[in-house]
Image (tube, grey):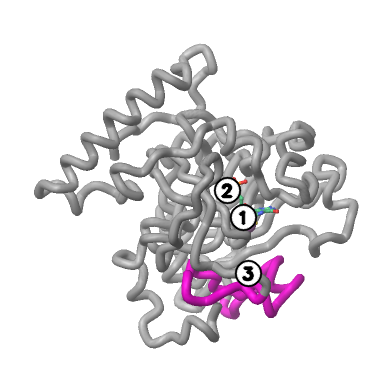
Amino acid sequence: MLIRRPPDIPSSEITDESAYLKRREFMQTAGGIAAGLALGPLLPKLLNAQTETTPYEAVTTYNNFYEFGTGKGDPEKNAHTLRTRPWTVTVEGEVNKPKVYDIEDILQRFPAEERIYRLRCVEAWSMVIPWLGFSLRDLLAEVEPTSQARYVAFETLYDPQQMPGQRRAVLDWPYVEGLRMDEAMHPLTILSVGLYGRMLPNQNGAPIRLVVPWKYGFKSIKSIVKIRLVEEQPPTSWNISIPHEYGFYANVNPEVDHPRWSQARERPIGKFRRIPTQMFNGYGEEVASLYSGMDLRRFY
Ligand SMILES: Nc1nc2c(c(=O)[nH]1)N[C@H]1C(S)=C(S)[C@@H](COP(=O)(O)O)O[C@H]1N2
Ligand SMILES: [Mo]
């Protein structure tokens, strides 16, 4: 789309933030203009041409990553112990061609493009982030899912030496997540390797994490080492931990409240005012059809 650039550019070549933001502003305007013309449908969705991105500083210091502590500032403080090289991602299960990918191969073979997506946390805060990534379906196509594959299960690294939060039983480790096959194959679902034109900082899920823009943030599992195609709906960490609060689907839905708080509004990080939460986080046009006929109160 607008920017196609490998995420592993040396730091000496990285533009400073204000130059980056100016260029971004220009591109968002350009995207907005193009969207009004015939080009519109060809452009991968920018959340909305006018949406302001959350400052890099906030995106990288206010995080949920329980492997490094349960406070929002803990991941930034503690995630330096994570070693992201060497790193492999095993793709296995119901596939014809299981494969162990080296992260360097992934970076080379699946060019990262910029996608501006809102990440809406179930705790009712949100950020708008220029992610660098590629559609998960490009990688899945390569391993050739069998006809038995109905779900995709994801797993984060388990290593209490590197991830001190795993020494405490706050969640069942390793962190696991899952998607239905059609959700995983949807072009909006990305594996992200960077943000703001840089490689992912450890606290944001380096070296590779999922981003599913129409679901609550907890579905976007970080620091992935395993992707397994399976026949049955896989367990997910938050659902195991507190099933009546966190379901498998976790679609952003302002009409279905969390048992302990409303989901009708959200606070953009760095802003004072709350804003209304949109159905499917604003991606209804693209994804609502995946759930036609499903009762989204029951499948929360
Ligand atoms: N492995 C792992 N992945 C995770 C989490 C976690 O604790 N561990 N937290 C999730 C939650 S609750 C949210 S809101 C997002 C936050 O992503 P961000 O810190 O990049 O904004 O990561 C998700 N992915
Ligand atoms: Mo979250």
Instruction: Report how far apart the C-alphas of labels 2 and 3 lie in the structure.
Output: 27 Å
Residue 227 image-quadrant placement: bottom right
Instruction: Report how far apart the C-alphas of labels 3 and 1 lie in the structure.
Output: 23 Å
- In terms of depth relative to the viewer, which is nearer, 241 or 134? 241
- In terms of depth relative to the viewer, which is nearer, 272 or 215? 272
- In terms of depth relative to the viewer, which is nearer, 269 or 245? 269
Residue 257 image-quadrant placement: bottom right
Classify 145 as above or below 46: below
Task: Tell me the crowding category of disc 3: few under 14, some 14 to 19, or many 20 or more residues within 10 angstroms, Cα based.
Answer: few
Q: Nearer the viewer, mark 3 or mark 1?
A: 3
Q: What kind of element bears circle 2?
A: strand
Amino acid type, mark 2: Arg
In the picture, measured across the screen, residue 290 lies left or right of residue 74, that is left
Task: Tell me the crowding category of disc 1: few under 14, some 14 to 19, or many 20 or more residues within 10 angstroms, Cα based.
Answer: many
Residue 26 is one of the magenta-drawn residues: no
Relative image position of residue 148 (x, y in whole percent): 50, 78
In the picture, measured across the screen, residue 275 lies left or right of residue 263, that is left
Task: Give the magenta range.
Answer: 231-259
User: Would you name the residue on which mark 3 appears?
Assistant: 261
Q: Nearer the viewer, mark 2 or mark 3?
A: 3
Residue 94 in sight: no
Whether tag 3 and tag 1 are in contact, CB under 8 A, the answer is no
Whether tag 1 and tag 2 are in contact, CB under 8 A, the answer is yes
Residue at 82% across / 47% down in the picture?
159
Q: Earlier in the sequence, mark 2 or mark 3?
A: 2
Residue at 10% across / 49% down in the picture?
38
Residue at 48% across / 22% down in the picture?
9
Q: Mark 1 vs ligand 1: CB under 8 Å?
A: yes
The numbered dot on residue 165 is none
The numbered dot on residue 209 is 2
Task: Tell me the crowding category of disc 2: few under 14, some 14 to 19, or many 20 or more residues within 10 angstroms, Cα based.
Answer: many
The numbered dot on residue 221 is 1
